[in-house]
Amino acid sequence: AAEQAAPQDDSLVTHAAKMSKEEGALDLSRPAQELHNRVRAFAGWPGATVKLWLSGADGQPRTAMVLKVLQSRLGPSSDGSDILHQPDLTVQALRLPCGPDGSEVLEVIRLQPENKKPMGPRDWLNGMKGRTVHLNPE
């Protein structure tokens, strides 16, 4: 490899700013493909995160929860008749509606709640204890 190396042209060098943790926050109004690419790009550090809201049956205000998205895949897009308006939790994936109109789906297949070990959606679902997942605090 050393014998094939070519010197770098200093006039073409650019500076990349240091990444911050805030860059890893997923904006669910963006297309699913872009979010999936961000999950893969920010693997390790800073990590891709999504903020969700939890509510219980007791009428208490919703509480925020930040999940680190460790692995994702693109879910089937909607034709408009079955658009997800809230996260859909199955045993195989946490399905997040995304895109400008919510017709796209990002499926989270490996996640990590704050201060917890990485887990699959089924394990996270078991720990929810009847709480409901929402995209917003209202």
Image (tube, grey):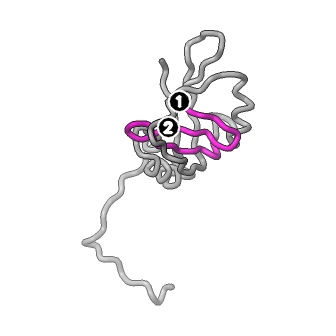
Question: Residue at point 56% right, 18% down?
Answer: 62
CA neighbours of label 1 inside 10 A, class few (<14), some (14 to 19), many (20+) = some
Q: Give the range drawn in magenta.
A: 87-111
Farthest bottom residue?
A: 3
Q: Is residue 98 left or right of residue 125?
A: left
Pick the front one: 33 or 103: 103
Tell me if label 1 and label 2 are in contact, CB under 8 Å. Answer: yes
Q: In this view, does 65 lie above or below 75?
A: above
Q: Which of 100 and 25 is in front in this view?
A: 100
Using a 10 Å C-alpha cutoff, classify the residue at mark 2 as few (fewer than 14 neighbours), some (14 to 19) or many (20 or more).
many
Residue 105 colored in magenta in the image: yes
Q: Between residues 10 and 21, which one lies in front from this camera angle? A: 21
Query: What residue do we see at 53% from left, 44% from top?
Result: 106
The location of residue 91, given as percent across then percent down, is: 70, 40
How many callouts does the rendering have? 2
Identity of the amino acid at label 1? Gln
Q: Which of 121 and 12 is in front in this view?
A: 121
80 sits left or right of 109 in the view: left
> What amino acid is labelled 2 in the image?
Pro
Query: What residue sits right under mark 1 in the picture?
Result: 86
Q: Where is residue 37 in the image (x, y as percent from the top left)?
A: 47, 53
Main SS, magenta region, reads: strand
The residue singled out by tag 2 in the image is 97
Looking at the image, is mark 1 or mark 2 earlier in the sequence? 1
User: SS at mark 1?
Assistant: loop
Q: Does the magenta stretch include residue 122?
A: no
